[in-house]
Amino acid sequence: MSCFRVIEVDDFVADCILKGADLLSPAITDLTVVSGMKKGEKVVLKAKSKSMPFAIGKSLVKGSYFSAENVASGAVWTAVHLITDAIQTELDVNTSITYYNTDSNLSTAAKSMDAGVESVAFRRRASSLKSDVVDIAEVAGTATDEEPEDDDIE
Amino acid sequence: MDALAHIVRMFRKKKDVAIAVKRPLNDEEVSQLFEDAVKQFPSLENALGEALSNTKVFACPVAANAVIYITKRLPVLIDIDGRSDLYPTLRTNYTHYSTHYTLFPHKPISTQG
């Protein structure tokens, strides 16, 4: 059973990648992870302080590229889908990302995105709850008993 | 690297995922999509089976010949070039992230006792 190759990177590297950078060769500290990697292989990136991946992309080089000569040069991975890209922020807004832990200081972009997603989800939950309350009030006949507040009268 | 250069910053802006047309897939197309995806990601078979079954799947062409497959407004798969080069979204990965781990069973340390 094949599975994704997961490369673990430091948090500041994750910050740079979430801002649009490619993964460069020096960011890979554990060379055993990339042994046997093929060019064009689908690779998942994970920050060290997180348990879940934040990016998925393609490798640009083979595993044999990582040697003492090449270790300090070149992009080795490019992103296809990030946790901060438009797929996540525009298309996936109806549920909050609870799997990605935002406690530690990974990225302000990721934090704001999660906060936005959670607020959207919260607003939708609140509006659905509000509509339920109105329905219940209408059924119970208590909707007309309440006096309007001063803020509502304009 | 030049061949892969187009995928850099592919879905960075809102206009990159602006959906003009949502084409609903029929059952055959969904099963074909499922087969293609499972062929590329055998470990995500259960996740994709859950995501793609008993719901309508829409193919949404977006910028740069990419196609995003969406169910219930949740993106499940990304086809980056329209030629079945599929990527699961991070949400699909998150929900079944445990499938990434591989267990290596160790040999018995001692045969005595």
Image (cartoon, rainbow, N blue to C red):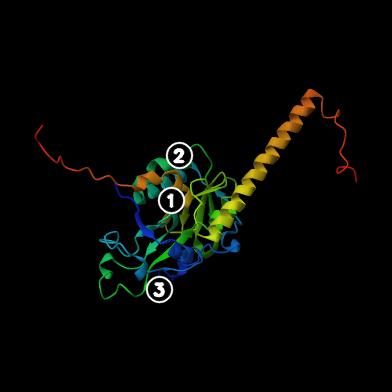
Look at mark 3 in the image and give the residue it sits on.
B2
Can I make out residue B81 in this image?
no
Crowdedness near tag 2: few (<14), some (14–19) or many (≥20) residues, C-alpha within 10 Å? few
SS category of the residue bearing label 1 = loop
Q: Are marks 1 and 3 in contact (CB under 8 Å)?
A: no
Q: In which chain is the residue bearing label 3?
A: B
Left or right placement of residue B49 versus residue B109 in this view? right
Crowdedness near tag 3: few (<14), some (14–19) or many (≥20) residues, C-alpha within 10 Å? few
Q: Residue furthest top?
A: A140
The percent coordinates of residue A43 (x first, y second) are 37, 58
| Residue appearing at x 53%, y 62% in the figure | B11
Q: Quadrant of residue B17?
A: bottom right
Instruction: Give the spatial CA distance, label 1 vs label 2.
Output: 20 Å
The percent coordinates of residue B34 (x first, y second) are 41, 45
Instruction: Give the spatial CA distance, label 3 vs label 2.
Output: 36 Å
Q: Quadrant of residue B83?
A: bottom left
SS category of the residue bearing label 2 = helix
Q: Amino acid at mark 2?
A: Glu
| Residue appearing at x 36%, y 67% in the figure | A60
**Disc assigned to residue A52:** 1
Look at mark 2 in the image and give the residue it sits on.
B50
The percent coordinates of residue A146 (x first, y second) are 85, 31
Can I make out residue B55 in this image?
yes
Q: Residue furthest right?
A: A154
Q: Amino acid at mark 3?
A: Asp
